[in-house]
Image: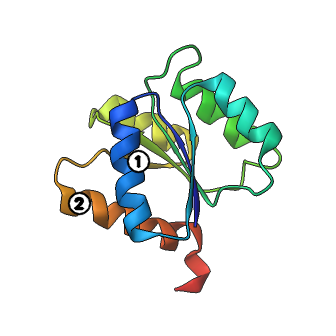
Amino acid sequence: MRVLLIDDNDADHRFFQLLFNENFPQGELLRAKDSDSLDDIMKNSVHLPEVILVDLNLPGKDGRQILGELQKHPTYGGIPKFVWTSSSSPQDKKVALDHGVGFQSKPLEISEYIKFIQSLEVLANPKKV
């Protein structure tokens, strides 16, 4: 399982990494803090992610712009994506809908966080189920 997390919050990243590693010990979590580090990953990664999570509130280009670019990208366009945010506002849900991607508020309960992380494998490979 290979996931690309686009999120500038270090604490959120560390927590996600911890739970991801527990659930996918052989998995790989790539992280971009902003559009520049995303560009580096896209240019230098040997393997594509299977799922991409995009926070909306990022420095520089925000997540809305990044989602639009990813959806149009010839290589990354077909990869399942989710808006990954601490917000649950209807406007943010509409952003996901407008871009044709999923929406996931960052869970407050650890059990919900784990459940979402475990669901990533199914989301990345729906034909395996």
Indicate the amino acid at tag 1: Phe
Disc 2 to disc 1, how far (Cα)?
14 Å
Q: Is residue 106 left or right of residue 96?
A: left
| Mark 2 residue type | Glu
- For the question of whether residue 73 can be seen, the reply is no
Instruction: Judge whether 46 appears above or below 67 on screen.
Output: below
Extreme residue toward the left, this view: 109
In the image, residue 93 lies at what x, y percent?
Answer: 37, 39
Question: Which residue is located at x 43 percent, y 62 percent?
Answer: 21
On screen, residue 39 above or below 2: above
Image location (x, y in percent) of residue 15: 33, 46
Label of residue 103 in the image: 1
Picture coordinates of residue 101, whole percent (x, y): 53, 48
Question: In the rendered structure, are the residues bearing label 2 and label 1 in contact, judged by CB atoms less than 8 Å apart?
Answer: no
Foreground pick, 49 / 96 = 49
Quarter occupied by the N terminus = bottom right
Q: How many labels does the image show?
A: 2
Front label number (2 vs 1): 2
The spot of residue 77 in percent (x, y) is 72, 48
Instruction: Say which mark, if any, is on residue 112.
Output: 2
| Image side of residue 50 versus residue 57, left or right | right
